[in-house]
Each structure stands twice: as C-alpha cells, then as structure tokens.
Amino acid sequence: MSSKRPKSKEARKIKGKDKKKENNFPTTDEGASELDHPDYIFPLVLTSATQELFGCRADEDLTGENPYKLLKKEDIVQDMKTRASVSDFSPVKQLVLDYPEDELLLVFDRDFTYGQSFYLVLTVEAKDNILKPSVQGDDEEPITHEEEVEEEEDMIIPKTPESHPWMSLGSEQEIEEESVTESRPRLRYKISPLLRRCGAPVFFSDRGALDRKEGFVECPSYQDKSFSIRAMERHTAVQASSDTKHSTTQTLWKYPRNTWTQYESREFSLDEKEHHLRSENMKNFITSVLTRFEISLQQNHIADVFCDDWTALCEDDGVLMGKTETTLKEYQSFMDLYFSKEKTISHIRWHPTISGVIAVSMTERLSLEERIDNSAKLLLNPSYILFWNFTDPINPQLQLECPDDVLCFQFCPSDPNIIAGGCMNGQVVLWDISAHVERLQDTRSGGKNISNNLDRNNVTPVVRYCAVSGIEIGHKAPITDIQWLPETFELSKLGIPVENPSRVSVQLVTCAPDCCVLFWDLRPPRAVSQSLTDVKQKSQEKPLENPHGVPNTFKHLNLTWKPFIRVSLPKIGSSGEYSPLKFSLRDNTVDCPTGDKPPQNVDREEGCGFAQLRVPSAKQQKPLENISTKLYVGTEDGELIYTDWKIEKDNDSGRLLSSKPIHRLLVHDTLVNTVSRSPFFRDILLTVSSFSFSIWKEGVTSGPLLRSACSKMLRTVGHWSLSRPAVFFIGKEDGSIEVWDLLQNSHEPSQIQNISSAAVTCISTSSISSKQHLLAVSDRLGTLHILQIPWTLRRSSNSERQIVKKYFEKEEGRLEYFQKRQIQHEKERKEMEAEQQRKKTEPMMSLKQEEELEAEALKEYEQFLALEKVILKNMGLLTVAEDRADL
C-alpha cells in the first residue's frame, strides 16, 4: 500500500490541473506566450533594497521552484507612507488599499513572462487558484483501497503518436501560381565568322605606342549602375512543412519516488587492526612508498592544489567568461533634502567593519567673503557628518555634530567607533559612536524589523563630539588632511618611533596651509603628584549630569588638547616656509621583524580605555630602528616636499627645531589636491594637480616615473584601485571620471565616463565582496553617487603586479639614463666654455713666429724622407735608377 501512494498523489495532481484549466487564471507556466498581462496581476520592479526589506530576494529567498511570497498588507502600506513616491509599491497604492484580505501574493517571474521580474496578484480568487495545488496537497485525506484502484485506472499512460498520411489543403496551387514558368520556347542564335577571313595569312609588325593617338586604348574599370539595382520587393513561393522524425526507446516510464538508504562503514576490529599494523607486509609497504610520499607532501606545500586551472587559463579573456561590461554602473545615490541643500561633500569614508555604510562630511558652498558675511547664520546652523546605508537612500542613519565645517575625517584603525576630523577653523574633533553601532548593524540586515529602522518620531539621532582642541593652540588655517598612526608604534616628543605597548592607535597627524604639520596624542599627559586631600575631595565630588548624552571617552582632552610635536617646513635655499595641503606617511605596519602585523587586543572594549592610558616615561620607551620617519607633503604651489618629522637640536642656540626638507620636486603648476600611496607598492605615490597628475617613486629625485599631459578640464581628485595595481581613477571639474589602466595606455585614459553635472570632489573605493566592488563619487552639489565597478576593472591577473613593477623599474632606469646624459652634457658644456675662454685669453702669435714654425716642420719632414731612403736601400727595395728618378 505504501508503495502505491505516490501514484495516487500524482493522479490527484493531474486532476487538480484539469480543474485549474477550467478557470481563467493561468499559472506561471501558462500564459508565457502572452504579451499583455491579465487584469488580476500587476508587474513590478523591486529594487535590491526593497527585496531585502520584505525578504523576497531574487534567486535567494524566491527561486524558480518556490516563486511565491505572501506579503502583509500593513507592511506595504507602512512602506508607502515611509518612502512615499520612492516606494516600489506606489503605482498600485489604491489597489493595495482596496484589497479585502490582510495578505497579498507576490510571485517571482524568473522568465520575465510579463516584462518584469515580479508581479503582484490583486484579487483573492486569483491568489486562491494559484496556491490551490499546494493547499490541496497539505489537506489531503487518507486514501482507501477502492479510491487507489480507481485512480490507478484513471492514470494517464503516455502513448507514441501515430503517423497520418499527408492531406492537401490547397497550398500547392498558390505555390504553382507564384512559381516562374516558361511561357515560350527559348531563342537560339548561331554565330560564325566570314568565310573570306577564314584561313587568311596573318602578319604581325612592331609599332610604338606613342607614335599615334590610336597607338593604345585604355580600358579603365568603372561601376556599371545596371548591375547595382537594389531589389526592393520580390515574390517568392515557399512551402513550409514540419520535419518528421522516427525514434524508439526501450526505457520504461515510472513514477519518481522519494527513497533513502542508510549504511554503516565497514571497519576492522581492534585485534585485526593491531595485527595488520604489526605485520611485515605493512612495514615493507611503508618502506617502499616512503620516498614518494615525502615528495608528494613537499609538492603540496609548494604548489596550490586548490587552484582552479581553468579559471587561471581564461582569466584575461572576459568574453569567454561572459564579462564584457567595461563601464561604471550607477548602483545607488544619496542626497538629503535638508542637510545636503546648498552644500557640498568635502570628504567621504567607508566604514571599515560594517559593509554598506558610508560617511560623508557636508560643508557650506560659500567663498571666504560670503562665509564672513554669513558668519552669524553659520553659527546657528551646525555642520554634520552623515552616515548613509544602502537599505535607506532617503534618511541618513546617523549624524555627527561638528563645531565647524569638516574638511577631512578618518576612522581609528584599532577602534572604528572613534572618529577624528579636521575643521575649517583649525580645530581637531573627536567622536565616539559606540552607543549607535547596533543601529548601523541592524540596518545592514535588510529590514527584517521594519518598524525599528527609524525612531518613533522618524528622526535621525545626532551624536555630539566628545572633545575638541583649543582653537588658540592648534592650526591657524583649515585642516586639509588627517591620518592616524598605525598600532605598531608611537612617537616620542622628539619624533623618534618607539614601541607601542598598548597596541592601540592613540596618535594622529594633521596638516594645514599654516606651514606646519602637527602630531596629536589622545592620552592624557602624565599627571602631577597630588596631595591626599585633593584626591579625597575629587572622590567625594558627585559626577556632573550629562543632559546631551555626550560620551566621556575624551573628556580629559576637551578644549585643552594640544599637539605634542610641531613640524615646520622651511624652504630650501630661501626664506619662508612651504604651505602643505596633503601628506602621505609610509605604511610601516609591515616593517616588523616577522613581516606581519602584531596581534591586536581582542578583549579590549571598543570606545573605552583611552582615558586610562597614559604616556609612558622616556626611560620605558624602546626606540625602533626599522620605522621610516619620512613623509611626502603636497603644497599650495604645486611642489612635492620630502621631509623628516624628527626634531633636531640646534648647535648654536640649543633649541629644538625641525630639520629642513630633504629635497623638493616641482612638476605641477597649481596646488596639489591628492597625495596617495599605491595599496600594492608602498614606495609609489600618485599626485594630482589641477592640470596634470604624476606617479613618483620614493627615493627617485630626478623626476616622476609618469607625467600626464595637460588637460583642458581641471582635475580635482585621484584615487588608486584596491584590486588592480595598474588602475587608478581621476575626477574632473566637469563631473566626469577618467579610468587609467597602465596595462593598456599610459598616455591617455582607457575610458572617460560622465557621472554628474557638477565637479567631482571625492573618490573612494570599497570591496563589498569578491564579485562586487563599489566606487563612491561625490560632487559639488552634495550628491553621493555609488557606482559598481565592472569585472574588467576589478579582476586582476596573476602577473599584473609583476608587469606593473617591471614597468616602474623600466621608467626608473629611463630617468637614471637621462640624468647621466644630463650630467655628461653639462660636463661637456663646461669643457667647451673653458676651451673658448682659454682661446680668448691667449695672445695672438706674430707672423714671424708662424714662419719659423713652418720652416722647422719642413726641415723635420726632409730629414724623415732622407732616413726613409736609407732604410729602403739597406733592405734592397730601392734601386739606383729609382733614386735618381726621385732626384
């Protein structure tokens, strides 16, 4: 009985299908050939954010085998209220509101039967008919023996179709009418030469082609228009017939059954195992294969056995893999109607640990004069750093309040909840977002809890800054660049790298056009010894209330924070100082003896512990010798400065002063807006100016390895690719992006793509996964564009890094060659000038001295001739007759 039940279920399914066909509601398979959708469904386009919000992701939550999803009506109504016209359900708003039941059916149309990937069922009757087969299978009653026998009799048995003779329907008459037939007999012509010319003698003679005009006849080729007539219409008779095919098979058709088999592995007993391990045959076998086994183990360590050779074989051929996209695709865009209005984006940063979260700093789009005139208005409207998430492109997830417009900011490498920023008034600001990390992580889940995405009042939380530096002891100009020092080391007050025992990034570097680079420390200074009474008084004091909810992480630095190192940049060979805009430190995290990053303190609580850390004494600090203290600085005058941040003691005055820059490189004509190191080569830098960009190598002072031609449109920013060593991006003032690929061209970009109508201000890349790399581009109008990088720009070949490295080495050799040639030419020029100067200073010889010199030369020549004759005579080569002839 149990073996026959699947047959009865299939029979019931067949009957259910027959009943279903009686209705007017087709399934997903039916109606595939229909071009217009029925009235009871509505095709929809659901974005990736909406799919994650309602848990209906294509090919993940919904598949071709399970294409149905029941959506709650209240969730759809709430989505239309929250996102208004941006909601994907806004076209069917009234139909959803009029729907009588609480759940609507969403169907995943994988084959795009009705033009879109999803369609919504709008009637209850259609929903019941679509879901009826599954409901009947769930509520199936037990089957009796009589019903089973009856259903087996009604079971459909497939039969081979029988062939029938061909029957004429009149098509052969139409074919005969359209066919061309001969209406008259064909004409025949006979051609023969004249009899008087047959057999006549033939005479040939020579004649020049230029003797007469008719001496030669030129037959140039020409196009005959009679043979180039295009047939616009032609009547052709074609008879269509279906192909017949005869085939046979011996396979018996059976119903599929769900079966399973359980087995148990066969093993030797303990005695048998002991016997085999101690046997001589086992020992001889191990001795014989020992050498081959060791060789195989060594090969496994040397070669990557998990490498996919097929993928590596076709890694450079994107056509074979179906990856032909080469342009940047718009993935998403962010813009707030209130906080982005009449503002521009000055800096963007991806969250280092939470994927899909990006932070942008907003600044007023005003000139210096307008900022001075509207200073009172700017004080009442504070600036913010906005956190955006892919799941909500309308409302920012978090706002960081700033004392002034922030031009640059960066996440702490050891604790991403700590953020440092540089303001336009020269202050350094610190934020702690530890209390709001769960909010950023919840939004990444794709909207599983829709009601908790925003607060009750639909207001984005505002985070106040923890600490700000004193305005009189910091920079005197807007801070244009900021960077954290790595966890592996810290700096003493003299700028000497020492060991960092806490393994926490506690120091950062800033620069501004006030001609100095400042180093800051987050730890409180060493406290002066206090009396016991003061300690008791402080312990008895009650902590002050915190009405704004500001974290006390950096309470010890607020308004008293000052830099511990000030590096000035005096000019080389002249008075004055350089004005830095951007700088780049060398990545010293891989300079450890082991070659790896040191282990981090995983048990450390995020956002806490900075107040408990203290600056160690100079005796406890252990200097590190393998840390580079050099940095590159880009200035307002287009210069690239290579300097050292160490503080030196002046021998004359005994004061601690900054050393002069090591060398100055002048290539650009205007200010340097980008100084960025390659993520693959730590000694390769990219500098971008208004009209050109250059690629430099640390240690090469003769010039850049690559310098671009001057551009008609101003260049605003540059950024390296994180996945390909040969690719970098350049933003321009007209809103376009230049994609440079050194493997294709080094004199022009591989492609130029327009992104916005305003100037590009910032560019940043992020690797969401191995198959999705995103490029964030901001413009001057305050819009953040998220672009998807195509496969050709993110897929790196195995040899690309070596090819780019050889290219840089070749360019370095070219610079060395030109430098040697220049030195040689300079040396030759100096020698020529010295020779000309010597000739000018020598006195003119008198005519008498010249005659005496000529007479002495003639006398020496005659003596030589006489000696030659004597030698020839002695050798017998000169006879007396020849001697007389010479005389």
Image: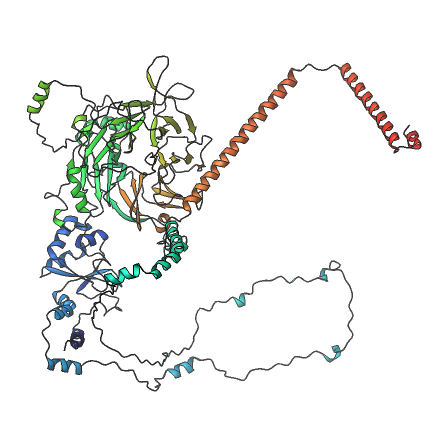
Nearest to the observer: residue 503 or residue 316: 503
Instruction: Determine whether, in the image, residue 145 is placed left or right of residue 167.
Output: left
Quadrant holding the C terminus = top right
Instruction: Determine whether, in the image, residue 860 is placed left or right of residue 349.
Output: right
Find residue 360 and report its horizontal and vertical position in percent.
24, 38
Nearest to the observer: residue 727 or residue 587: 587
Quadrant housing residue 341? top left
Q: Is residue 512 visible?
A: no
Q: How is the image coloured?
A: rainbow
447 versus 121 height, above or below: above
Q: Count of labels shown? A: 0
Quadrant housing residue 205? bottom right
Instruction: Determine whether, in the image, residue 863 is placed left or right of residue 755.
Output: right
Find residue 622 and report its horizontal and vertical position in percent.
29, 27
Find residue 470 and report its horizontal and vertical position in percent.
21, 23
Instruction: Determine whether, in the image, residue 383 is placed left or right of residue 495.
Output: left
Quadrant housing residue 171? bottom left
Quadrant holding the N terminus = bottom left
Q: Is residue 368 visible?
A: yes
Nearest to the observer: residue 259 or residue 510: 259
99 versus 410 height, above or below: below
Find residue 718 and report its horizontal and vertical position in percent.
36, 38
